[in-house]
Image (spheres, rainbow, N blue to C red):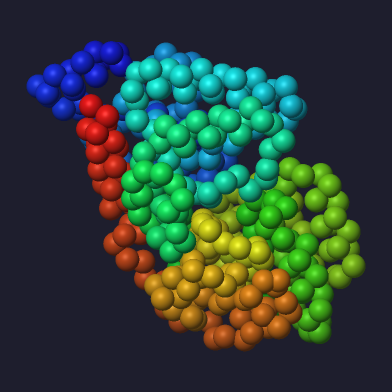
Amino acid sequence: MGLRQRRKRYRSGTARIDPLVVMQSFTSVSDQSNPFVHLLDRSLPSNVVSMPFSWRYALRGGYDVFHVHWPEAMVRRRGRFASEARCIVLFAVLLRIWICGIPIVRTVHNVSPHEKSASLTEGLAFKWIDAMCFDYIDLNGAVGVDSLRGNIHTILHGHYRDWYAGQHLQIDRCDHVPNRILFFGLIRPYKNVLGLIKAFREIDDEDLELRVAGGIDDDSLKGDITLAAAQDSRVSLAFGYLTDVEVVKEAQNARLIVLPYSTLFNSGVALLALSLGTPILLPAGAVADSMVKEFGSVWISQFNPPLTSEAINSARSKGIPKQRVTFGVEREWDFIGRRHSEVYISAVERRA
């Protein structure tokens, strides 16, 4: 059923659109996709059809809702020309969405992109998305997003236990190396890996290890990290995409996972670490306070930025938890999928 026929049927009041077709802003999920998109995609109930993003489908396909996740991921590419070209096509997509009255739902993974773009075109496109959006999904409920205009729906970030258990990976074994500290995940400037290495090097303990593992696209940052790590034999680096097996191995071999950011809004890495049974050290703030309240101070340690050697020592001195983390129903993906469906339906009903 085409978009025009679907909307005519809905607006007539004779029948609800069933199933509801939602175009996600992420492309077809793959082995290297963020597990979040896999888990969301398969958690949606049968009354929702989730379609991956493509420029052809965005311009010509029949969909009822456009769900935006990381808008910068749609347009940013290596090379200014390629990024600008995608921004121009995005304007065409948004014009089509505006003309057709398709509601936009945006998940607030971060209030603004972590790496600023010098492109005026990109900034205008993102402002238009927010101008057209009336429904936002907040993943933590701890940091205010009141500056966003529209309805704020708090749907907590889900855990990752089902993702790894579904691949028959052992996630309940705790083989923590007592003296290993870990940073893992995509390495980007705002994550302050250099600050972590600096603080670690100030710790006088020859048996202590620091492991940095994850993909990195910034050649300059990669060189700086390599140089800093070379000055301390206790620091080991593993650059590159981590498979699920490697993620489990790295997390479960660590005594403590450190997120050395200056601020924290959302972090899938924190939920991933807890899902795999490894305590974490986070920057202090509303998000960390909320996680301490939910999971306990044995699992969650805080530091006041910038990260120091004292904060690392304090966190690693805690005893290793004897029981795995308990996640509430609001972090279960069946519940999360139903809540997303409710947001999609309400957005369509309001527009209709």
- Residue found at x 58% / y 76%: 302
Q: State the quadrant of the C terminus.
A: top left
Seen from the viewer's position, the closer of residues 310 and 352 is 352
Q: Is residue 24 above or below residue 193?
A: above
- Residue found at x 35% / y 59%: 331
Q: Is residue 213 left or right of residue 63?
A: right
Measuring from the top left, give residue 35's x and y in whole percent: 49, 47
Quadrant of the rendered structure where residue 79 is? Answer: top right
Seen from the viewer's position, the closer of residues 118 and 17 is 118
Q: Is residue 253 left or right of residue 41?
A: right
Measuring from the top left, give residue 95's x and y in whole percent: 46, 19
- Residue found at x 80% / y 70%: 198
Q: Is residue 55 above or below residue 217?
A: above
Measuring from the top left, give residue 120's x and y in whole percent: 66, 30
Count of numbered labels shown in the rendering: 0
Q: Is residue 58 left or right of residue 198?
A: left
Q: State the quadrant of the N terminus.
A: top left
Q: Is residue 77 above or below residue 328?
A: above
- Residue found at x 40% / y 36%: 133
Measuring from the top left, give residue 230's x and y in whole percent: 88, 63
Q: Is residue 316 left or right of residue 18?
A: right
Seen from the viewer's position, the closer of residues 162 and 222 is 222
In this view, which residue lies farthest toward the left?
14
Residue 289 appears anywhere in the view: yes
Residue 28 appears anywhere in the view: no
Quadrant of the rendered structure where residue 319 is? Answer: bottom right
Q: Is residue 291 above or below residue 221?
A: below
